[in-house]
Amino acid sequence: MAENAPYDALLRDTAVALTAAGIDNVRFEARLLLSRAAGLTIEQLIARGRDPAPAAVAAALRELTARRVRREPMAYILGEREFWGLPFKVSPAVLIPRPDSETVIETVLDLLPDRSRKLRILDLGLGSGCLLLTLLREYPQATSVGIDASEAALAIAQANALALGVASRARLSRGDWRQAGWTDQLEGRFDLLVSNPPYIESAVVDGLMPEVAAHEPRLALDGGTDGLAAYRIIAAEAPRLVVPGGWAVVEAGEGQAPAIAALFGAAGLTPKPTRLDLGGVARVVPAQY
């Protein structure tokens, strides 16, 4: 990148570097990186396209581009990802929120249409908090408990809870469902249990796209030999965690919904029709106790 090159030239050079790294949507991503490096909006960048960029902007852009070329996810580079129209802070400690997971929110809103209910919500595997905190925004009388095995993830979720104005209704604490006694800290039952647990088969994780396999937390991806390890635990404990008439609503990997529904059924819950994501994949399994 030439010294004091115009913004347009920096944009072109960045797009070329991203293309060489095998990245798609290079023009869009290049604009995001230049916007971050320059501290300007996309609209401001377009308006200043032929103006020479300060050397500090070019240097910052080189650093950001190098990270993306190494296939670090854009969300980690920017430190934020939008979910349900809300901004969520993210870091390599948490799974990046995805549009598919918004199907969980849509399902809950359909099942529990009264937004004024004083729900008690439990989120297992909290991550960034995108599911739990979004639900607290949608149900202003609800209170919640969120657990995660990672202290670093809990710190991100707590920051998001504060930024979204729901921290007073969210008790976030460390808990690892792979260890005995993980439910001891959960006092009472819940009207709603939600979870996006790890569901990738262990043998498949390392073969995922580099942005996922090399950068997102394996703890949030690896679902055991068949991808269903976490669901077995959730289903087994659900009758002790959910009130009669309450719901368990979980995200599923592609092709897993029938097996997950069967696990809930065997545990004494009544599986309901699965919900499809925008790609037509059976993404969410709801079950009522």
Image (tube, rainbow, N blue to C red):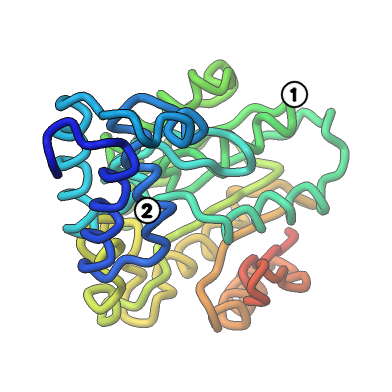
Residue at which label 2 appears: 177
Q: Is residue 98 above or below residue 274?
A: above
Query: Tag 1, which secondary structure?
Result: loop
Residue at which label 1 appears: 141
The residue under label 2 is which amino acid type?
A: Trp
Q: Nearer the viewer, mark 2 or mark 1?
A: 1
Q: Which of marks 1 and 2 precedes in the sequence?
A: 1
Quadrant (top left, top right, bottom left, bottom right) of the C terminus: bottom right
Quadrant (top left, top right, bottom left, bottom right) of the N terminus: top left
Residue 284 in the image: state x and y as whole percent: 64, 66
Q: Is residue 225 above or below residue 80?
A: below
Question: Which residue occupies 32% across, 74% down?
Answer: 224
Q: Residue furthest right?
A: 114
The residue under label 1 is which amino acid type?
A: Gln
Bin the neighbour count of mark 1 within 10 Å (Cα to Cα): few under 14, some 14-19, many 20 and up. Answer: some
Q: Is residue 128 above or below residue 67?
A: above
| Of the pair 243 and 261, the residue shown nearer to us | 261
Q: Is residue 46 left or right of residue 62?
A: right
Q: Is residue 260 left or right of residue 151?
A: right
Q: From this viewpoint, is residue 172 visible? A: no
**Label 2 to label 1: alpha-carbon separation:** 28 Å
Q: From this viewpoint, is residue 74 visible? A: yes
Question: Which residue occupies 16% across, 42% down?
Answer: 62
Q: Is residue 163 above or below residue 133?
A: above
Q: Which of the 4 image quarters holds residue 36? A: top left
Residue 223 in the image: state x and y as whole percent: 36, 69
Residue 199 in the image: state x and y as whole percent: 42, 69
Residue 9 in the image: state x and y as whole percent: 28, 45
Question: Which residue occupies 77% across, 70% down?
Answer: 272
Q: Which of the 4 image quarters holds residue 15? A: bottom left
Question: Which residue occupies 39% across, 44% down?
Answer: 31
